[in-house]
């Protein structure tokens, strides 16, 4: 499906911290024929960029919720820091 009919945006909001350390929320606004697959694609790009910028080693989507008006998917993402190596 063409991306022209499946637009997504964060409207500059980006990741916002939750009350849990290293856990953030983000909204991916969707239009046209964009569904959960297109939103998942967009959030994964945002996750990769945030992970690299903030020094996290991995990330995991904890939850995804759809809102009808305005149309967006809200994700809760857990970012993980690199494990520190302890000398034996």
Image (cartoon, rainbow, N blue to C red):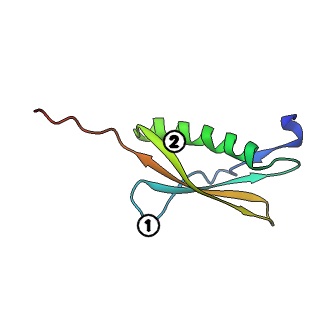
Q: Position of residue 20 (x, y in %)?
A: 41, 63
Assign a secondary structure to mark 1: loop
In terms of image quadrants, where is residue 55?
Answer: top left
- Count up the numbered dots: 2
Q: Position of residue 85 (x, y in %)?
A: 21, 34
Q: Estimate the spatial distance between the alpha carbons at disc 1 and disc 2, rounded to whole Å.
A: 18 Å
Q: Position of residue 38 (x, y in %)?
A: 75, 43
Q: Residue at x 74, y 49 (%)?
A: 36
- The quadrant of the image that shows the N terminus is top right
Q: Which residue is mark 2?
A: 50
The answer to which of 14 and 22 lies nearer the viewer is 22
Q: Residue at x 84, y 51 (%)?
A: 31
Q: Is residue 84 left or right of residue 43?
A: left
Which residue is most to the left?
88
Q: Residue at x 83, y 36 (%)?
A: 3
Q: Where residue 27 is drawn, which disc sits there?
A: none
Query: Do the residues under discs 1 and 2 have CB atoms within 8 angstroms?
Result: no
Mark nearer the N terminus (1 vs 2): 1
- The quadrant of the image that shows the C terminus is top left
The answer to which of 53 and 33 lies nearer the viewer is 33
Q: Position of residue 43 (x, y in %)?
A: 63, 45
| Vertical relation: 25 (above or below) 79 | below
Assign a secondary structure to mark 2: helix
Q: How many residues crowd around disc 1 within 10 Å: few (fewer than 14), some, or many (20 or more)?
A: few
Q: Which residue is mark 1?
A: 19
Q: How many residues crowd around disc 2 within 10 Å: few (fewer than 14), some, or many (20 or more)?
A: some
Q: Residue at x 48, y 43 (%)?
A: 59
């Amino acid at each position: 499906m063409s991306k022209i009919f499946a637009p997504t945006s964060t409207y500059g909001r980006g990741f916002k911290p939750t009350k849990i350390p290293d856990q953030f929320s983000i909204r991916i606004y969707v239009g046209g024929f964009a569904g959960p697959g297109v939103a998942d694609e967009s959030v994964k790009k945002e996750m990769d960029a945030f992970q690299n910028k903030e020094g996290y080693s991995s990330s995991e989507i904890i939850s995804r919720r759809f809102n009808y008006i305005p149309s967006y998917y809200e994700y809760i993402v857990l970012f993980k820091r690199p494990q520190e190596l302890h000398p034996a």
